Image (cartoon, helix red, strand yellow):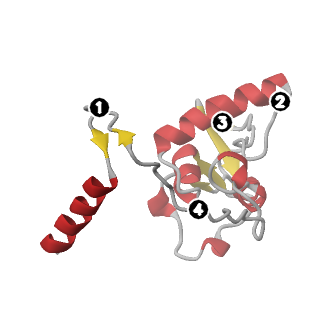
Amino acid sequence: MNLDALKLINTPDDLPANLDEVPDDAYITTTVFAHLAEIKPESFRSMKVRSDKNHREGTSRPGDIPFTDEKIGNSPVWPMGVYRTWMKNRPGKGVGGGRPVGTKVAKKPQPPKRLELPAKCPHCDHEITGEDVLRQKQAAEAQA
């Protein structure tokens, strides 16, 4: 890698306000990649280790951090174009990216729960009668 002609964005502070101004051949560091993807740097490093393992084993998954063999010193760098492609194709947050829009399953309305009286209290074995329920209801109304 020719370091003299290299355009490197080393920190998020080096990013211009308009990201379209960053050329696709400019390189970004792990810190910048994490910042752009809105991922904590520690989480990004964990994701990268997992992604590199998937790449090595041939089991890459959507959302894996793109593999790079480009390095400055021991630090990996990616061309901005690789980041843009990854971000455009990245699945949504969470496992599987969530349920597709318009496929929400409506819950069936449930009938009200019924208690057959008399019944035994599961806590104290007291026999609950209709009179107990009526007294409880009247007490609640009196407090309101």
Q: Which of the 4 image quarters holds residue 139? A: bottom left
Residue closest to the eye, 22 or 96: 96
Badge 1 is on which residue?
125
Q: Which of the 4 image quarters holds residue 69? A: top right
Give the residue at x 82% y 23%.
57
Q: Please, what secondary structure does the residue beneath circle 3 have?
A: strand
Residue closest to the eye, 127 or 15: 127
Q: Position of residue 66 (x, y in %)?
A: 74, 43
Give the residue at x 61% y 52%.
28
Q: Measure the alpha-carbon separation of dots 4 and 2.
A: 47 Å
Q: Is residue 105 above or below residue 94?
A: below
User: Within 10 angstroms of label 3, few (less than 14), some, or many (20 or more) residues?
Assistant: few
Q: Amino acid at mark 1?
A: Asp
* In contact (CB < 8 Å): disc 4 and disc 1: no
Badge 4 is on which residue?
111
Q: Earlier in the sequence, mark 4 or mark 3?
A: 3
**Quarter that holds the C terminus:** bottom left
Q: Position of residue 19 (x, y in %)?
A: 61, 71
Q: Amino acid at mark 2?
A: Thr
Q: Please, what secondary structure does the residue beneath circle 4 have?
A: loop
For residue 71, the mark is 3
Badge 2 is on which residue?
59
Q: Measure the alpha-carbon separation of dots 3 and 1.
A: 72 Å
Q: Is residue 69 above or below residue 20?
A: above
Q: Measure the alpha-carbon separation of dots 4 and 1.
A: 27 Å
User: Within 10 angstroms of label 2, few (less than 14), some, or many (20 or more) residues?
Assistant: few
